[in-house]
Amino acid sequence: MEFKTPIVPQANQRLSADYLRFDSAGAHLVGQRCDVCGTQLFPKTGICPGCQSEQLTDVALPRQGTLYSWSIVHVAPKPWVTPYVIGYVDLPEGVRVFAHIGGDPQTLKIGMPVALYASAVVAHEREPGTPLFTFNPVSAENS
Ligand SMILES: [Zn+2]
């Protein structure tokens, strides 16, 4: 399955290179696939939760998924500045990712298509502008 990537992000300072892979279309989160049973994982672990195999191979995960659930954060530890949105995104083949969610919170709907985008931290007192990856709603013409 092929997904379009909206933009090509810059190098990221928060996620290590172990968790990001770049190609000509943009960035993918990097998870793992079990060589024995095919279960996909994110983040990486040392053992498959499906069959306990330790034979795991890094794989670039699809950029697009669906919004499983989300919440607007109104109370957070410093230096985070509220409000901001967090949520879970279901990627194909069973991977659920906890992430910042971009876009207008008033338009978010459970089950809507979202995709990985490069963004910048705005909800942080000390490090505004730090590169950040968010899952943002995908319009019908981009999906
Ligand atoms: Zn397995």
Image (cartoon, helix red, strand yellow):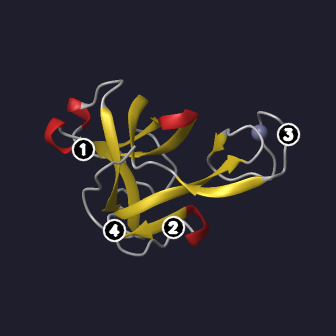
Label 2 crowding class (10 Å Cα cut-off): few <14, some 14-19, many 20+? few
* Placement of 55 over or under 27, stated as above or below: above
What whole-number distance in Å separates the C-alpha atoms at marks 3 and 1?
38 Å
Tag 4 residue: 9
Secondary structure of the residue carrying numbered label 1: loop
Q: Amino acid at mark 1?
A: Gly
x%, y% of residue 120? 33, 64
Q: Of the two numbered discs 4 and 1 on the same chain, state the one appearing first in sequence.
A: 4
Q: Of the two numbered discs 3 and 4 on the same chain, state the one appearing first in sequence.
A: 4
Secondary structure of the residue carrying numbered label 2: loop
Which picture quadrant has residue 95?
A: top right
| The residue carrying mark 1 has its beta carbon less than 8 Å from ligand 1 | no
| The residue carrying mark 3 has its beta carbon less than 8 Å from ligand 1 | yes
Which picture quadrant has residue 101?
A: top left
Q: Amino acid at mark 4?
A: Pro
Q: Kindly identify the residue that appears in the image at 21 percent across and 31 percent down.
A: 106
x%, y% of residue 80? 44, 55
Secondary structure of the residue carrying numbered label 4: loop
Tag 1 residue: 103
Q: Quadrant of ligand 1?
A: top right
What whole-number distance in Å separates the C-alpha atoms at marks 3 and 4?
35 Å
Instruction: Give the residue furthest to the left.
Output: 141
What whole-number distance in Å separates the C-alpha atoms at marks 3 and 2?
29 Å
Tag 2 residue: 14
Q: Are marks 3 and 2 in contact (CB under 8 Å)?
A: no
Q: Of the two numbered discs 3 and 2 on the same chain, state the one appearing first in sequence.
A: 2
Q: Amino acid at mark 3?
A: Gln
Q: Is residue 12 left or right of residue 142?
A: right
